[in-house]
Every structure is written in C-alpha cells, then in structure tokens.
Amino acid sequence: MPAEAGGRPDRVQAPFGRRLCEVIESRAAGGYRIFTLADQTGPPPAPGQFFMLAASPDWSGEGGRPYLPRAISHARVSEHVKGGLRLDFLIDEVGPGTSRLARMKPGDGCWVAGPFGGRFSLPKQLNSKAAGAILVGGGIGIAPMAVLRRELVDRGIPSRTLLGFRDQQHSGGIDELFGCEETRLAYEDGSSGHKGYVTDLLLQLLEGDDSGSAAVYSCGPPAMLEAVRQICLERGLPVELALESPMACGYGACFGCAVPKAEGGYMRLCIDGPVVRGDEIASAMAGEPAVG
C-alpha cells in the first residue's frame, strides 16, 4: 500500500464543500441509534476516517443550537444503494447535535462533508512482526472498530475484538455491526460479560501472548484510550488510537481539535489524525470529547 511521509497510508481525499444525502433508514440499536445515508457522490471512506454531519431539518433551531456540524465516524459502508454508497453511523444522543441526527427519518436530508482524516494502518505497517490485530472499543467508539475489523477479515488478517460499555443503557450496535463474529464484552456494572473495564480484558489477553506479535487499535472515551495507550507503551506494543475532539470544519482551518504531541507542539486531529500512534501524543486525555 502506498504511504505518505512518515509511513502513513494514503488517505481518501474529501470533495470540497458539503453535499445533501438522503436518510434511508433509522433504527434503535440498544441504547444507541443507527442511521443510514445514501451518498451518491462521495468516495468510499477508509477505516478510521470520519464525516462532518448536520441534519437538514430543524438544524440551528432552539436558540441557534446546534450551529456547527458534528464529527461522526462511519460504522459501516457498502455500495449500490440508490446509485451510491450506503453509510451507517452509530449515534448516542448526548446533546443538541446528536439528538437532531438521531431524530432524522427516512426521506430527510443530511448535509455531509468528508471523509476526513487519515486511516488506520495495517498490522504489518505498525509492527513488522505482527501476526494479527487486537481491537479495543468502548461506547460508540465501537463503530471504527467494526469498520477496521471488516477490512481485516476481507484481507485474511486475524483479529480479536474487545468491547466495553458502562451499562446496557449505554451500549448498542454489537449485533448490527459485528454480527456473529466472536467478541469479548465488558460492562462496568456487570450486567453482561466481564464485570469491569475493557482494559481488564486487554491485560488478560496480553498475559498469554507475545507482545511482539500483535498491533493494537482502539477507539472510545479518553480515559479508556489513555489506559490502552499506557498498557501498550509499557509493553513496547505499537498502538493506534482514534481520538475525538471538538471540530468546526474538518479541513484544519479552525484549530479546534489541536492536541499536544509527545515531542512538543501540536497536531490537528482532523488532518493529522484522528488516528494517531500512542507514542506520538502526550496523552489521550488531551482532547476533550466532542460536544454532542
């Protein structure tokens, strides 16, 4: 695969401007929602990339909020829906923007810009000795993990998936996005699977493995990402994290998503990320969660 400077894989370039896409489905998925758009003109996104979304109906109501679009990672992509791509997104209603997106109905329009950012590397690109991948997802951060896992399966690359949630109310998308594929689950309240954190499952998995034979990928809440980052750095295990931060444009102009780099200075997640190596950043806690 061709690589950019620094060894990063080539990214899919976003068309300039935004386009109006039709909502073709919206459904409950556990405590979250999955909505589907038909994108007739955009390029297929790569695992780890994201879109800037704004619901066409009622956007910027209720005193002008929300005003800015929301940065959302795609959860699944397929072809040949109304002459274009089928894009699925996993949404947790945490604020005015995500609530508007979750309330969209089939036939509604959604303004879309993207795909933005860089993609996940393949295991061999992270670690020349990697025999497979370990995927660690938390909350709605399971969406990029589902896309990455699908690519790894298509390429015949072995992977193991660990997913963590606060409780049943703050979960969803497992059956829809991962199907019957084997996953290990952790719930903080013990309502299902392992009682505790998904990082407990990661530690258990690494106890029986040669740390030099895998690459780790993760997306989820900042505290979870920092715990994954520290676990991997302590073991010399390469890890890529998909970070979240407030964004206004997606093109690198607003500097709202700047996070500190390990060697000093800052990177903009929308163009230098959102996928970053764990040793590239000072902390995964540096970027605040995006406003919902």
Image: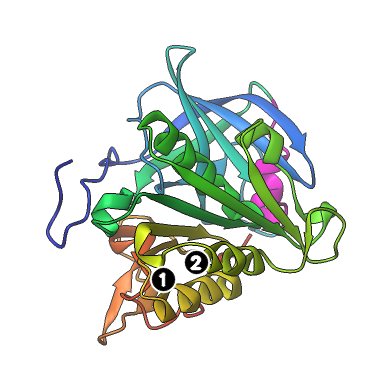
Q: Secondary structure at mark 2?
A: loop
Residue drawn at x 77%, y 55% as measured from the top left = 170
Residue range highlighted in magenta: 91-105
Is 95 in the magenta? yes
With 246 as the anchor, is 282 left or right in this view? left
Figure quadrant of residue 281:
bottom left
Residue drawn at x 41%, y 38% as measured from the top left = 152
Is 172 in the magenta? no
Q: Amino acid at mark 2?
A: Pro
Q: Amino acid at mark 1?
A: Gly
Q: Secondary structure at mark 1?
A: loop
Is 234 in front, or is 93? 234
Asked whether residue 121 is in view, the answer is: no
With 238 as the anchor, is 199 left or right in this view? right
Color style of the picture: rainbow
**What x and y, as percent, mark residue 269?**
36, 64
Looking at the rendering, in which quadrant would you find the C terminus?
A: bottom right
Marks counted in the figure total 2
Residue placed under numbered mark 1 in the picture: 256
**What x and y, as percent, mark residue 8?**
21, 55
**What x and y, as percent, mark residue 246?**
49, 66
How far, Cα to Cα, is label 2 from label 1? 6 Å
Is 29 in front, or is 103? 29
Neighbours of disc 1 within 10 Å: few (<14), some (14-19), many (20+): some
As drawn, the label of residue 246 is 2
Residue drawn at x 48%, y 54% as measured from the top left = 134
Figure quadrant of residue 41:
top left
Task: State if disc 1 and disc 2 touch (CB < 8 Å).
Answer: yes
Is 242 in front, or is 35? 242
Looking at the rendering, in which quadrant would you find the N terminus?
A: top left
